[in-house]
Amino acid sequence: VDDREAQVRGLVQNMEDALRQLASLEQSDPILLVDSKLAPPAKAPPELARCLELARANRPEMQALDAGIRASKAAHGLARAMWFPTLSLVGKQIIARAPTAEDPASVFANDPYNHIGGGGGLALTWDLDVIGRVAEIDEAAAKFRKIEAQRRAAQMGIELEVRKLHQNYES
């Protein structure tokens, strides 16, 4: 009995030290604890189905995994889009005027100082690294499936936790 009492006193001292540190109190500051039990709430908890629905919608880990699923779905779509060729349209406009430079007499002479011109082009590029593209698509799909599996596992864990808490509250 004496050993058990000493153990309890040690635990109480550890708890008081932790409370002092959390509350930023000095070691000499007293800790006054209320020695009464909390009254159970007058209102009954929501039904289990409602608790599960709220947990699925509001738990931060579910929101993070949902965002991860959206991101991995977008990454998979990007990897698939990279399979197709890229169409590029480019253009340029040049206007050069130098009032101190004279125009050459021949229209065929090069005059870089007094010039108006432009151009454009259409380019089609296609990376034909088939093995690399297929690997990128497969990797993005695997990441998507991994995050979906993590979400299902988290959902099962959350449901188990909510059911346990609801059952403990009812008993």
Image (spheres, rainbow, N blue to C red):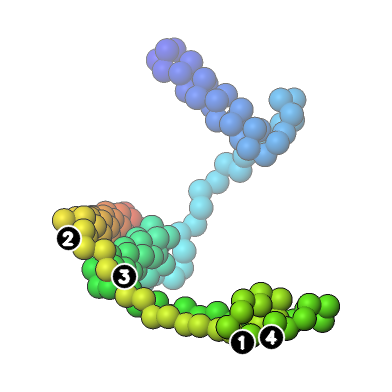
Quadrant (top left/top right/bottom left/bottom right) for the C terminus: bottom left
C-alpha separation, residue under disc 2 versus residue under disc 4: 56 Å
Left/right of residue 27 with respect to residue 2 in the rendered view: right
Mark 2 vs mark 3, CA separation in Å = 14 Å
Residue 72: percent from left, percent from top:
31, 63
Cα separation, mark 4 vs mark 1, equals 7 Å
Q: Earlier in the sequence, mark 1 or mark 2?
A: 1
Residue named by callout 1:
107
Q: Which residue is mark 4?
A: 105
Q: CA distance from mark 3 to mark 4?
A: 43 Å
Q: How far across and how far down the image is residue 115, in percent?
A: 66, 82
Under mark 1, the amino acid is Val
Amino acid identity at mark 2: Val
Query: Which of 158/97 is in front?
Result: 97
Q: Name the outermost residue toward the front.
A: 105
Quick one: which residue is furthest to the top in this view? 2
The quadrant where residue 101 appears: bottom right
Please give the residue where the numbered disc 3 appears in the rendered image.
125
- In primary-sequence order, the first of circles 2 and 4 is 4
Q: Is residue 76 visible?
A: no
First in sequence: mark 3 vs mark 4:
4
